[in-house]
Image (cartoon, helix red, strand yellow):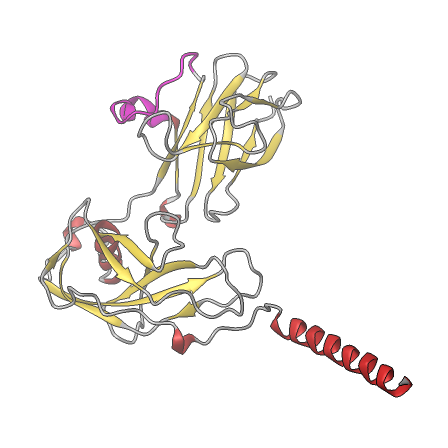
Amino acid sequence: MKFAKLYTVLAAAVAVAGLSSCSENTDPKYHEPNAESFKIYTPAFQNDYYRLHDGGTFDVVLNGQPDYGFSAVAQYRLQVSTTQDFAAFETLTPTGTGTLSRMTLKDADLAMALCKLHGVESPDQYVDLGEQVVYLRGQAFISGVEGSEVVTSNVTSLNRVQSYLKLPIPGVIYVIGNYVGDWIGPEAANEAALAPYALSEKPDEIDSKKYYGTIGFTADNCIFRFYTALEGWDANSLGCSGGTDSDTPVEFPDFVAGSTLEHGLAKTKDSFSFPNYTGSLEFFVDLSDSANPKVVITAPQN
C-alpha cells in the first residue's frame, strides 16, 4: 500500500515536471529570422506598361512577417534598383503605418528614386529613358527592438515603368500657433501665408524626416503645435505628449530666454505653452523614429 502511494506521488511529480518543461520550451524567444522564407510576390502588372504620375500609387505584396520566434509588429519598406544585383538602390517608405505586408507606395517616390539612381540633380540633366525595368525587394524589421535584424526578401521586377522628372525636395512641416496673435489655420489655401512658419529638412538630409527652423513670436505666451500637412485642424497634428488630449495647452512656466526643452510629440492637439517667454524660438523636430517623435526647442539668450 505504501509503495502504491509512493508510486502515485512520483508519477504526479514527473507529470508536473513535464508540464513545466513544456511550458519553458514554448516560451516565445526572439531569434534571427530565416531570410529565405521572406518573399516578395511578383506583381500582377509586372509586364504591363506602367506610367508614373503625381498622385498615383501601386501595391507590392510580401508573404507576411519573418519568423522572429514570436508574434511581432514588423515594419516594412521597399528597396528599388535599376540593376538586379542592387549595386545601388533607394528605399521607399509605404503609406500608412508601414506595418502591413501589403505595401502601398507612391508613384512620386519611385520617380524620385529613379532620378537619384540615374544621377539626375537638375532639370537639364534629365533624359526620358522610356520604359525601364525596375527591380524590387522588400525589407522587414522590428522597430525599437535592439539587435533585431533587417530581413531582405528575394528580388522581383516591374518591366515597363515610364518615369518622369521628380527631383528631391526638402520636406516641410508647419508650426501653427499665436506668433502673430491670431492663429493661421492649417489649410491648403493658407500655404503661402504659412511659408514663413515652416520647418524644413536640410538639402543634404532629404527624406530624413528631420526639420529645422527659427520662428519669431510677437504675442505674449507662446502657444503652438505642429502640422505635417495642411489638411485642416483635425488631421496631421503633432502636439505635446503627456497632455490630456483635449486641445488644451501644456504649460512650461520655467521656459525663458536661454532655455532648451526636449520633449516628446504625440498625435494630439494639446499645444506647447510658454507663458513667460516672447521672442524667437529655434526648432528641431525629429520624426525619423515614428515610434518616438520629439522636438528640441531653444530660446536664444538675450
**Image position, residue 250 (x, y; %):** 58, 24
**Image position, residue 41 (x, y; %):** 27, 69
Magenta stretch, residue numbers: 180-196
Viewer-side residue, 163 vs 284: 163
Task: Name the residue rendered at 37%, 56% in the picture.
Answer: 100
Asked if residue 253 is positioned above or below residue 5 in the image, the reply reads above
- Residue 17: quadrant of the picture: bottom right
Viewer-side residue, 127 vs 268: 268
Asked if residue 175 is positioned above or below residue 39 in the image, the reply reads above
Viewer-side residue, 224 vs 123: 224
**Image position, residue 186 (x, y; %):** 34, 25
Q: In which quarter of the image is the C terminus?
A: top right
Asked if residue 223 is positioned above or below residue 151 in the image, the reply reads above
| Residue 5 is one of the magenta-drawn residues | no
**Image position, residue 238 (x, y; %):** 46, 33
Seen in the image, is 58 located left or right of residue 225? left
Seen in the image, is 41 located left or right of residue 24? left
- Residue 58: quadrant of the picture: bottom left
